[in-house]
Amino acid sequence: MVHVIEQQEPSAQAAPSLPFKPLPRPNFFLAVRVSHSPAVRQALESVGAALVSHSAELAGAVEPSVRAHITLGLMHLTGPEHVAEVASLLQGPAMAAALRAEGLDRPLTLSLRGLSHFRDSVLYLDVGGGQQPPSPESAAEGAAPAVPDGGRSQLERLMHVLLAQLSPHAYQQGSGVFSPHVTIAKLFKLQTPQGGTTVERCRAQG
């Protein structure tokens, strides 16, 4: 299921005044929830546990497995009524028909691999890799078969369908490189009084 989720970002300094009106800053994102099946949760939690075993200070940064999701797009919504409107569109008949036409109206089977970081502030697993057979849980849910690219192409199609349907109703961030991933830890949550980023310090410890 696709959700509309409010952005959670590190605190930022006030932006300087500009001679022109800036575009609205995205404050919500569209995301696909990762399965809450015991096998999936255990796999994600094992990655977090491995990080903590390497550096105990990361315990406060690891994300709970129940929050695991894959972001599909960013948008600017102006208030509760606007959020409710977009949420209603996601569940509406036009969206259902558009997803069905693309064969995207059932759970997807994805592969996760590697551990990467974004600007030394977020650790994540990439979507991609070899084709994996569906788990018994995903098969029981009627999940779509896995594809050789680990599901990246399916997610990209899903993103385009969703944003095309929602574009008349919400400002969206300009398109960039689509990099589907599952966040494992948010390092910006941690204080680093010793100086340097948490990633740099963990590298030094390793």
Image (spheres, rainbow, N blue to C red):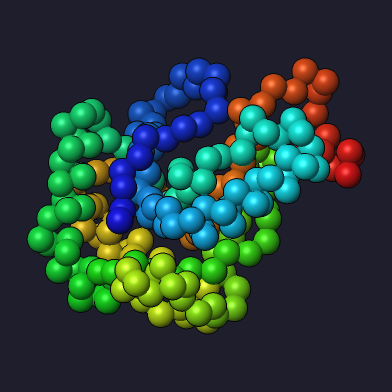
Q: In this view, does 99 lie to the left or right of 157?
A: left
Q: Quadrant of residue 161?
A: bottom left
Between 169 and 198, the residue placed more toward the observer is 198
Q: In this view, does 13 lie above or below 105?
A: above
Whole-percent x, y for residue 29 in the image: 37, 44
Whole-percent x, y for residue 13 in the image: 55, 19
Whole-percent x, y for residue 183 in the image: 56, 47
Q: In which quarter of the image is the N terminus?
A: bottom left
Extreme-left residue of the structure: 93
Residue depicted at x 50% and y 31%: 9
Q: Is residue 123 visible?
A: no
Whole-percent x, y for residue 90 in the image: 20, 53
Between 92 and 169, the residue placed more toward the observer is 92
Q: In this view, does 131 lie above or below 17?
A: below
Report the number of discs. Answer: 0
Residue depicted at x 18% and y 38%: 84
Q: Is residue 159 visible?
A: yes
Residue depicted at x 60% and y 73%: 129
Residue depicted at x 31% and y 47%: 3
Q: In this view, does 55 lie to the left or right of 58?
A: right
Q: In which quarter of the image is the C terminus?
A: top right
Q: In this view, does 151 lie to the left or right of 108?
A: right
Q: In this view, does 123 lie to the left or right of 83?
A: right
